[in-house]
Image (spheres, helix red, strand yellow):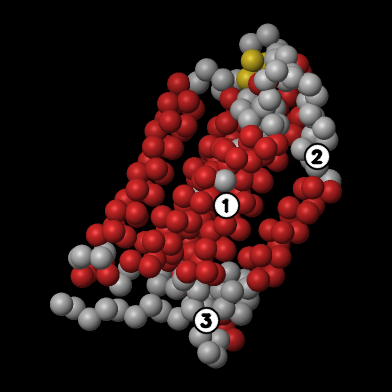
Amino acid sequence: MSAPIPLPRSRPLNLWLMLALPLALAALLLTFEPVTLDLSLAQWMYQPGEGFIGRHSWFLENVLHDRAKQLVIFLCAAALIAWAVGFFHAPLRSYRRTLGYLALAMLAAASIVTPLKALTAVQCPWDLTQFGGKETYSSLLSPRPPTEHPGRCWPGGHASSGFVLFALYFALRDRKPRLARYAFWFALGLGSLFSISRMLQGAHFLSHNIWTALFDWLICLGFYALLLYRPATQPSAESSTGLTAAESR
């Protein structure tokens, strides 16, 4: 049986960048909700009498929505299975904690969306009178107008299928910093692509998806700090800025 490989020491976390900045953005969104920007972008994607330009797109619905979501579910399931196999298969044993983090962070980040949708009851753009629907618009913190059909659109659900992959960044951060940087941009790009695709279909406003990215980032960061973060006793000066010096190369 091969000897277990010790977990690498973590590079210091820049809490101003990784925690304070997302929290500041969340506070800014609560204080100055971008209603005008949300409605203007939705109006640009809407054609009177026809609906949202991507509402009936086969590619957006079947490829970027259904198949992409299935792929992310597969990745999460694969991480969970690999974690379980690690109890019995020596080559995976040293990665078991990382795989467990990956599955847990992705599941938690994805699972928070549905309860928040039920709690907030925010309407989708396609349900609003401005865009051919029957419901009245209300901002996030304002009371909901009376309706028999409460909304289920805040935060963005499908965007989370991309943004949950922030977990890949944290899973790789201490083992493969360069690959972790690629994983970060991949998660950000995929989540943004899914966000735009659903906006084109009239399912979400821009701010809905920004909130999703913030929630998923903070959840993945929190589980990383809880399960994987192992700070060195004497952090090097070269990794004290940005995402870390190694990740900026």
Q: Nearer the viewer, mark 3 or mark 2?
A: 2
Cα separation between marks 1 and 2:
21 Å
| Left or right of residue 237: residue 87 | left
Label 3 element class: loop
- Do we see residue 37 in this rendering? no
Q: Label 3 amino acid?
A: Pro
Image quarter for residue 13? bottom right
- Do we see residue 96 in this rendering? yes
Circles 1 and 3, Cβ within 8 Å, touching? The answer is: no
Q: How many marks?
A: 3
Mark found first going from the N terminus, 1 or 2: 2
Mark found first going from the N terminus, 1 or 3: 1
Residue at figure coordinates x 34%, y 54% from the top left: 80
| Most distant residue in the left direction | 1
Measuring from the top left, give residue 40's x and y in whole percent. 76, 30
| Left or right of residue 222: residue 42 | right
Mark number for residue 216? 1
Give the vertical position of 129 relative to 198 (above or below): above
Q: Quick one: quadrant of the N terminus?
A: bottom left
Q: Which residue is mark 2?
A: 141
Q: Label 2 amino acid?
A: Leu
Give the vertical position of 122 relative to 181 (above or below): above
Q: Which residue is mark 3?
A: 231
Label 2 element class: loop
| Left or right of residue 81: residue 170 | right
Q: Nearer the viewer, mark 1 or mark 2?
A: 2
Residue at figure coordinates x 43%, y 37% from the top left: 69
